[in-house]
Image (cartoon, helix red, strand yellow):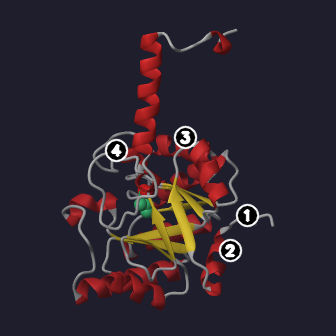
Amino acid sequence: MERKKRTAPSIVAMKERGEKIAVLTAYDHMTARLLDEAGVDMILVGDSAAMVVLGYENTLPVSLDAMVLLTAAVARARPKALVVGDMPFMSYQASIDDAVRSAGRLVKEGGAEAVKLEGGRRMVPKIAAVLEAGIPVMGHIGLTPQAIHELGGYRVQGKNDDAKERLLDDAKALEEAGCFSMVLEGMPWQVGKAITESISIPTIGIGAGPHTDGQVLVVNDILGYVEGKVPKFVRSYGDTKKVVSEAAGGFVRDVKSGAYPDLDESY
Ligand code: KIV
């Protein structure tokens, strides 16, 4: 049976049916096609591209232009999955106008079908304005990497009762603002569960335990295509680093020895 195109409303309906939601990031056309064939429900063109594609230390430096370019590459795969464009740091924080125009670029030039932005209650006016422009918004609370300096590093959030209450209030504010879903990042599983049970829109967890309505991971992490130690919540499903190293090593060997190309590989 042909899969139906995922839309923001159909993602909300998945929670109503109790169906888990699988989300991965992608930053290029081919990966987007393969993830879509594998059946993901949403492809997030995350600002994690700053780190895993562009080699920056954190997500802050990536520009809106770069995010538009990467989003367009993914959208051209015409996936059944919903394409969500991530709004990079300083593309929406300064003003409501910025938020609407940046979201508009991700949709108009990048082909995104929804956008994601980080932050709780204080982002409600911007979320409302983007929604007013007809663009579905995914929220993102908990460990919000664009606020790394405010948070004092990549720290698990919601660890005491007050912090948990604040996250619950943020989640309710985003739901009331009209978000169609929200990412819950870096929080104890009990907090992920409490938020998920207290709102009607889907929660997509990353390091937020097993009780969220869906899960998202960075594609490089599941592929084993990253340098250094990965966070505790990452499950790796492949060893792409090994595949790339072996293929590149084989090519270098064959060129150096003259084994590549042979006459069958020549015009
Ligand atoms: O940028 C990203 O990849 C993200 C996910 C980790 C949720 O925001």
Q: Which structural element holds mark 2?
A: helix
Q: Quick one: label 3 or label 2, which is nearer the N terminus?
A: 2
Spot occupied by residue 23 in the image (x, y as percentages of width and height): 53, 64
Spot occupied by residue 15 in the image (x, y as percentages of width and height): 59, 82
Q: On the image, numbered disc 2 is attached to which residue?
A: 10
Image point 22% across, 66% down: which residue?
A: 151
Q: Is residue 72 left or right of residue 49?
A: right
**Could you tell me the amino acid type at mark 2?**
Ser
Is 255 located above or below residue 91 in the figure? Answer: above
**Could you tell me the amino acid type at mark 4?**
Pro
| Marks 4,3: beta carbons within 8 A | no
Image point 30% across, 80% down: which residue?
A: 188
Q: Which image quarter: residue 14?
A: bottom right
Q: On the image, numbered disc 4 is attached to which residue?
A: 61
Cα separation between marks 4 and 1: 33 Å
Residue found farthest to the right: 1
Q: On the image, numbered disc 1 is attached to which residue?
A: 5
Image point 81% across, 67% down: which residue?
A: 1
